[in-house]
Amino acid sequence: MPRDKKFSESEVLDSAMLAFWQRGYEGTSMQDLVDATGINRGSIYAAFTSKRELFLRTLRHYDRIYREHHLRRISETHPPRDAIVAAFVSAARKPDDASRPLGCLLVNSALELSPHDPEVGTLVRLSLQAVERYFLTHIEAAQKAGEIDPGIDARETAQALLGLFLGLRVLTRSGVNPQAIESIVNQARTMLQ
């Protein structure tokens, strides 16, 4: 009779996520994952089959929490133009939880793995396309509401905002001067006049 697993998958994914986020995929050893999750190697392999599979599930978990759910909450509490600016402000802010690493796990993974790992590349690409759609949808809604000039090209602006947003995520990870971060947020506001 198979043994019941004695851990919460969501909690394991949260713990593994922090380990990968802090050290990257290559820099995170199986021992780091054992230490982070509190479960032994055999249980990790039994539940996730490999470090890579655990990483992929962790990346999807991160995307649900930090992109999908987070942007939905912002959309529900802000008018369209402000929802875009709020996404930038949120990305620029240092985490309330000091144990949470700076930057974005998806962006870090894009830089580390996407060029040579097609599956990670696909996950990252789909997530970034969703962020661009978020910007596009909110720009179009803000144009209809009279919050943004209807003459700007919504698609081009959404693409430019995505580039600016990715730059912001990389710079927050590197600990750049806070004035540079504020300049990026202000540039996003300017683009949405």
Image: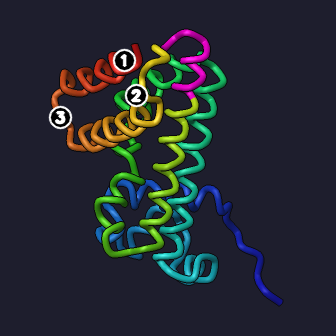
Q: Earlier in the sequence, mark 1 or mark 2?
A: 2
- Residue 180 x %, y %: 19, 26
In whole angstroms, how far apart are the C-alphas of marks 1 and 3? Answer: 20 Å
In screen coordinates, is 148 left or right of 7? left
Q: Which residue is mark 1?
A: 189
Q: Amino acid at mark 1?
A: Arg
Q: Amino acid at mark 3?
A: Val
Residue 102 visible somewhere in the drawing: no
In whole angstroms, how far apart are the C-alphas of marks 1 and 2? Answer: 9 Å
- Residue 126 x %, y %: 52, 56
Q: Furthest residue to the bottom? A: 1
Q: Earlier in the sequence, mark 1 or mark 3?
A: 3
Up-down: is 2 above or below 15? below
Q: Which residue is mark 3?
A: 176
Up-down: is 106 above or below 189? below
Q: Which residues are magenta?
A: 138-148
Residue 92 visible somewhere in the drawing: yes
In whole angstroms, how far apart are the C-alphas of marks 3 and 2? Answer: 16 Å
* Quarter in which the C terminus is drawn: top left
- Residue 43 x %, y %: 60, 79
Q: Amino acid at mark 2?
A: Phe
